[in-house]
Amino acid sequence: MARPLSDQDLLALADALAAGAWCSGETLAAAAGISRAALAKRIAHLRDWGLDVETQPGLGYRLQSPLSRLDAEQIRSALAPYTQAYLRQLDVVLRTDSTNQRLLEAGHAADPQMLFAEMQSAGRGRRGRVWRSPFGANLYGSLAWSFPAWPPQLGTLPLAVGVACARAIRTLGIDDVRLKWPNDLRVGAAKLGGILIEQRGEAGGACRVVIGIGLNISMSAAQAGALDQAWTSLAQACISAGIATPSRNLVASVLIDALIAALLQFEASGFASFLDDWNALDAAAGQAVRVTGGAQEVIEGIACGIDADGALIVDSAGRRRHLHAGDVSLRITGTS
């Protein structure tokens, strides 16, 4: 009886293709000790994972982009000393439904704890959107953090985290990263990443948050599928900036450093210390926008930054409107 196909079998094949060079089917099958037909089935499984595997008669197989898997030890070793002092647990898993869901269900005793996954089967974004999570193409991670008491401006935390993510990306050499209220990272008019924060706790008592980050690293158009918005990747942004694309392990460590520093800053001084930075990074400032509310109210006007409570300020029909996130959608429609 044939041995059941395991994740380790598929990982070995993914690693054999990782360099992005052509590999003959004969060589790959011989290395795995399997038939060419069995190899074809494994290639199909890799495609099911979201890996972009090309096939060419006479050449064999290759990945469209080189693959570098996440490694918890590499990520941890690159962390700043202050981060290592605070971060209690760091894990990388092959796959999961959602890194946010896994940490929401995990015990808080190991907080702060960080979880990355090579792929997600049920990654999610704000307002119930599906987050595309092909294997090894992007960065999917969540950080669980326990506050000793409910922060008075907890609703502004996604904005503070946005500033932290932008700081991390700028550290990597991408100076034109911007923030789109309330939780998107952008380069130009295209989405680079997003933030989803979920919380547990009782008002007035302890509060636990799980901060989910999705960051496009090297996702191809085929891997992205039919996304309903313009998107870009860190690799594309690096090409435009004329710099080399950093490894996903380095991006992960820089991101954790920025998140831990920002959470400590938020604990100490709230959102006030992030406000100027957020407004300086605002992708919508001075532009015509359309805001759709949960009751389908539509507000059109000029975006004028955010206020101290994190509300979007829109100059509409001669008056200033202060709009809180909730179930609200912002679309940038043009330049004023």
Image (cartoon, rainbow, N blue to C red):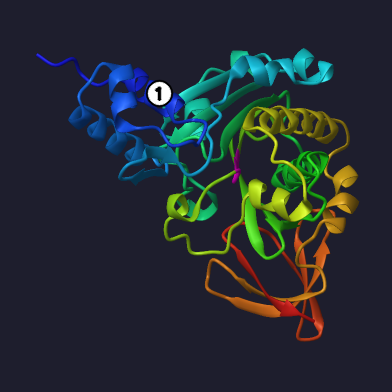
Give coordinates of residue 318: x percent, y percent.
81, 85
Q: Nearer the viewer, residue 232 or 336?
A: 232
* Residue at left offset 45%, top offset 25%: 15
Asked if the magenta segment contains residue 334, the reply would be no
Q: Residue furthest front?
A: 58
Residue 308: image quadrant is bottom right
- Work out which quarter of the rendered image holds the N terminus and state it: top left
Residue 285 in view of the camera: yes
Residue 90 in view of the camera: no
Q: Nearer the viewer, residue 89 or 315?
A: 89
Q: Secondary structure at mark 1?
A: helix
Q: Is residue 279 left or right of residue 252?
A: right
189 above or below 318? above
| Span of residues in magenta | 213-217
Q: Nearer the viewer, residue 228 or 73?
A: 73
291 above or below 72? below
Q: Residues within 10 Å of mark 1 (few under 14, many from 20)?
A: some
Q: The disc labelled 1 sits on which kind of residue? A: Leu
Q: Is residue 307 left or right of residue 202?
A: right
Q: Residue furthest bottom?
A: 317
Residue 180: image quadrant is bottom right
Q: Is residue 262 left or right of residue 116?
A: right
Give coordinates of residue 45: x percent, y percent.
30, 35
* Residue at left offset 35%, top offset 32%: 24
Q: Label 1 belongs to which residue?
A: 11
